[in-house]
Amino acid sequence: MVGVHMVVTLEPLRNDETTVAGLTREDVKVRQGKQPLLVTDWVPGRGSNAALQLFVLIDDTSDTSLGSQLDDLTTLITAQPATTWIGVGYMRNTSIEIVQNFTNDHALTAKALRLLSRSMPSVTMRISRRMLTETRFSGRQDCCILPTLP
């Protein structure tokens, strides 16, 4: 069996709740098809485990309507805690232009967002985990890709 690392985000079910009750590893059930899988660890992203590197990749050939969502993306970036380091890059064909390296200056990161060029047709992207694994970082790492939509 191959181990898999997952980042899970929990939110309250009702609007009048502000927190989620503490869950333990035993509370989490994972299945592959009908086969139950073992959860080996469950670490809340708080305190000394709150550090996160998040890289936002935007397909530069996406439909230009994505530009109307830049305010939402800016809000998402600026709402992150100081323990979240964010980078931004634009994908075009087989390359990635990194416009903002990892930083916890969220206002600076938000300024790196721009309208899309739509200058070339989209092609299948090969995304290397190297952007995340080259850094010596012991916290959580994630990559959010905003792709071309049909």
Image: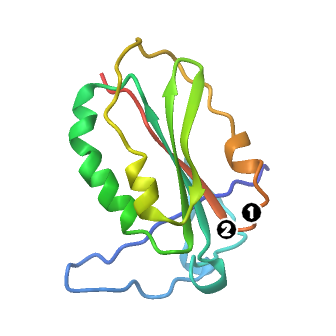
Report x, y in % for residue 90.
48, 33
| Within-10-Å neighbours for mark 1: few <14, some 14–19, many 20+ | few
Q: Which residue is mark 2?
A: 39
Q: Residue at x 75, y 67 (%)?
A: 138
Residue 21, above or below 98: below
User: Disc 2 to disc 1, how far (Cα)?
Assistant: 24 Å
Residue 12, above or below 67: below
Residue 103, above or below 2: below
Asked whether, in this view, residue 27 is left or right of residue 79, the answer is right
Report x, y in % for residue 8.
51, 64
- Residue 24 image-quadrant placement: bottom right
Report x, y in % for residue 78.
37, 65
Q: Earlier in the sequence, mark 2 or mark 1?
A: 2
Residue type pointed to by label 1: Phe
Q: Residue at x 62, y 32 (%)?
A: 127
Element type at mark 2: loop
Asked whether, in this view, residue 131 is left or right of residue 78, the answer is right
Q: Which of the numbered marks, if any, corresponds to residue 137?
A: 1
| Within-10-Å neighbours for mark 2: few <14, some 14–19, many 20+ | some
Q: Are marks 2 and 1 in contact (CB under 8 Å)?
A: no
Residue type pointed to by label 2: Val
